[in-house]
Amino acid sequence: MEFKQLFIYSGIYLFLFIAIEWTYIKYKLSTELTRKIIHIASGLIALSFPLFFTQLLSVAILCGMFLVILYASKPLKLLGSINDVERETKGSTIFPIIVCGCFWIFQQEQIYGFYYLPILILAICDPIAALTGKKIGYGPYTIMGNKKTFAGNLGFFISCFILTTGILFANGNIVFALSVAAGISLLCTIAEGLSINGYDNLTIPLTALGSLYFVKEVIMA
């Protein structure tokens, strides 16, 4: 068991949660803003997992610990910076599960892109979609009572395209990177646009992973 890594990462995440909660209470920030900050920061921290963890069990324990904390905080009325939202959302509890799942797939494939791409898209593009949609608000539409905007979809697509192109260009083929990035970005944008109640934290990385498997098994076979 990688006790040292578990101890360090537990401390990092606890510090993040406590710092954001303190800021939320002191400065009376909106929960939507603090949720986005935690979402981005948690994802960026998780990007380092493959560099410091070699055992799936260690990552599963770390993710499981915070899953328990998130579930327990709701009935105890704690972590208002995450839980004080009027809309129903499962995003915060899905997040650690999907991180653990992506780490497991990375270990099976031994391809860093299978971990980094889904987590990066989830951590960066999803908040950009929300912030762009709220700021611009162009083209509003509703999916099962959940408000979305085409501006948010466009913000997601552009940021996803840039990130995906950057990762895929590692093979040195710009035409391949651009074409595949366009397809993955389109599919992930559709997944984000159709997802409700925080389930985009599940559908986005699964769509990215499915696309990567298709590229690996069909296009590059």
Image (cartoon, rainbow, N blue to C red):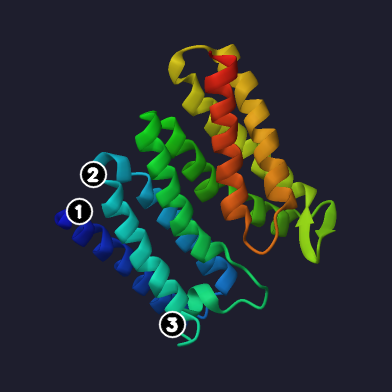
Residue 52 bears which disc, if any? 2
1 or 2: tag closer to the N-terminus: 1
Q: Residue at position x 35%, y 29% from top?
A: 110
Q: Residue furthest left?
A: 4
Give percent across and percent down for residue 126: 60, 50
Q: Is residue 41 left or right of residue 10?
A: right
What residue type is disc 2 on? Phe
Q: Is residue 173 left or right of residue 196?
A: left
Q: Residue at position x 15%, y 56% from top?
A: 4
- The residues tagged by marks 2 and 3 sit, at their Cα atoms, a distance apart of 34 Å
- Classed neighbour count for the residue bearing mark 1: other residues with Cα under 10 Å, few (<14), some (14–19), many (≥20): some
Which residue is the site of mark 1?
Answer: 5
Check contact, mark 1 vs mark 2: CB within 8 A.
yes
- The image shows a total of numbered marks equal to 3
On the question of residue 161 being in view, the answer is yes
Give percent across and percent down for residue 39: 49, 59
Residue 26 bears which disc, if any? 3
